[in-house]
Image (spheres, grey):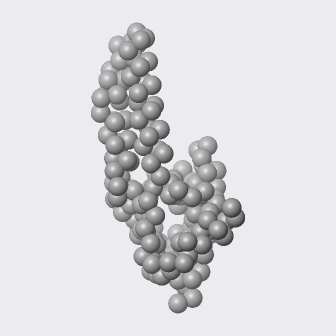
């Protein structure tokens, strides 16, 4: 299947709004990792320091994040004629099409993500901006598409929006 085939259903809905939901893969992977950690802690004898960290992680952090990622509407990307919204577990960021450029799939921290330049710094998305190799913004979720397809979708949607 070509890139055009993957993004054509989304582009057909221009000017939107179109909401693309995040994949449940991350939440399921976290839950699987959590189960492995619980199993390891049950059969091994960790030190006191490791045990305190394990209890905190096992009991609270991992399951909460995983369950939150599995809930509908917790993370999504919404495209419309004015720009795109990125909803994460905490907060929503809005980027106007006139303020963004250079969408590209980039390897970042061992994962391919969509990076882009943004003229206005809203102070949001700070950690992903800081981790990007060239200071650009990064989308850590590909919303069921490949990172390359998502970058192409964003660039194509932007081109259509700016022609209006």
Q: Is residue 26 left or right of residue 154?
A: left
Relative to residue 38, is residue 19 depicted above or below?
Answer: below
In the displayed image of the protein, which residue is found farthest to the bottom? 164
The answer, for residue 159, to whether it is visible in the render is yes
Q: Position of residue 104 (x, y in %)?
A: 63, 63
Relative to residue 122, is residue 80 depicted above or below?
Answer: below
Q: Is residue 152 left or right of residue 47?
A: right
**Residue closer to the observer: 18 or 101:** 18
At a point 29% along the width and 33% down the height, the residue shown is 60
Q: Quadrant of the N terminus?
A: bottom right
Q: Is residue 148 left or right of residue 10?
A: right
Q: Position of residue 59 (x, y in %)?
A: 30, 29
Relative to residue 121, is residue 65 depicted above or below?
Answer: above
Q: Position of residue 150 (x, y in %)?
A: 58, 63
**Residue closer to the observer: 130 or 7:** 7
The answer, for residue 98, to whether it is visible in the render is no
């Amino acid at each position: 299947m070509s890139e055009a085939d993957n993004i054509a259903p989304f582009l057909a809905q221009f000017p939107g709004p179109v909401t693309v939901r995040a994949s449940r893969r991350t939440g399921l992977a976290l839950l699987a990792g959590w189960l492995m950690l619980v199993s390891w802690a049950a059969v091994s004898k960790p030190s006191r320091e490791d045990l305190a960290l394990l209890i905190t992680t096992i009991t609270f952090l991992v399951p909460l994040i995983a369950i939150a990622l599995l809930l509908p509407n917790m993370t999504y990307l919404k495209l419309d004629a004015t720009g795109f919204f990125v909803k994460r577990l905490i907060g929503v960021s809005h980027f106007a099409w006139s303020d963004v450029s250079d969408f590209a799939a980039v390897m970042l921290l061992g994962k391919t993500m969509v990076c882009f330049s943004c003229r206005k710094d809203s102070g949001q998305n700070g950690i992903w901006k800081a981790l990007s190799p060239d200071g650009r913004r990064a989308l850590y979720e590909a919303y069921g598409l490949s990172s390359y397809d998502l970058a192409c979708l964003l660039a194509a949607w932007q081109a259509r929006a700016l022609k209006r």
